[in-house]
Image: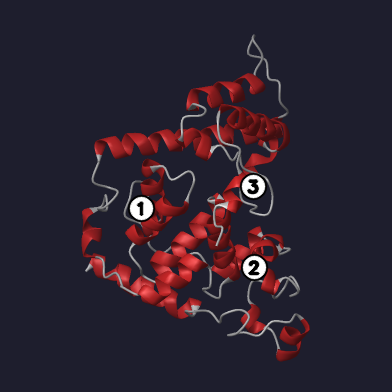
Amino acid sequence: MDWTGGLASTWKPGEIGARAALKTFMREAMGEYREGRNQPAQRGTSGLSPHLHFGEISPRQVWHAVRDAMYGPAGAKKLTHGAETGAQEFLRQLGWREFAHHLLHHFPNTPERPLRETFAKFPWRRDAKALRAWQRGVTGYPIVDAGMRELWHTGWMHNRVRMVVGSFLVKHLLIPWQEGAEWFWDTLVDANLANNTLGWQWIAGCGADAAPYFRIFNPVLQGEKFDADGAYVRRWVPELSRLPNHLIHKPWTATPIELAAASVSLGETYPNPIVDHDAARERALAAYATLKA
């Protein structure tokens, strides 16, 4: 398998590529960033993370370029209110990146150990088969599978989808967050140790300012909300591309006639869900309850 082909067609490494990515983002997406950053089928994010990781552009360069676009020499606003809101939201995300580096500096064990020590006793499961299904994008949940396949092909995954696939691994499957962090480290072109660690500990609920334990993303609802027309899933899970919008994020609810019309055979051309969402949610809540005990 020429798994590097997708990387070559997706990225333009180097300082020239970094500057081009920044200009394109500021021109086409920055003004709509607040909403666009949650739409995985759109070019709503900057795509700068690999360039920042490899030092092809610095956080200071990005910060000042955005600020210069927001304000003139005399401090006068240069953007509309909506565009300024998008720019400010982007700068906040850049700030989170810097915070991750400070956190790793002060807590150097966090790539392997939870920041919140009570999570060292969390009842994680070891399930090599489920982990493999997650890694290869064959979990039976289309938005999860689309994200994992995008990652394998391009070396990158949309941030909203990173949260969804991460939550699925640690809460639906109860597989240790370190397994997810290790896979991202091996496959992401922006595999920054500080941000990778911060993100996975946030998802698992054991890090700084972590997501609450009861926040368990429903992959169907996440898909329907942020990929309503199924464009993202259709791109990365083409075997489902002929399903109508109301079924593409939950193909197991389709009738045999609807599946046949879309040339989908569950269990053959596309897998059945490897876990039931409601049952997995209850199991996760029970596992998190043991920490309170």
**Lateral position of residue 91 relative to residue 122, left or right:** right
Residue density around tag 3, few if under 14, some if 14–19, many if 20 or more, within 10 Å: few
For residue 2, side relative to residue 177 (left or right) = right
Q: Residue furthest right?
A: 261
- Of residues 239 and 66, the one drawn nearer to the viewer in this rendering: 239
The circle on residue 237 is 2
Going 53% across and 62% down the picture, which residue do you hit?
A: 148
Of the 4 image quadrants, the one containing the N terminus is bottom right
| Comes first in the chain, label 2 or label 1 | 1
The amino acid type found where label 3 is placed reads: Ser
The residue pinned by badge 3 equals 9
Which circle, 2 or 3, is nearer the viewer? 3
Q: Secondary structure at mark 3?
A: helix
Residue at the image position 44 percent from the left and 80 percent from the top: 279
Find residue 196 and report its horizontal and vertical position in percent.
40, 47
How many neighbours does mark 1 have within 10 angstroms: few (below 14), some (14-19), or many (20 or more)? Answer: many
132 left or right, relative to 124? right
> Which is closer to the viewer, label 2 or label 1?
2
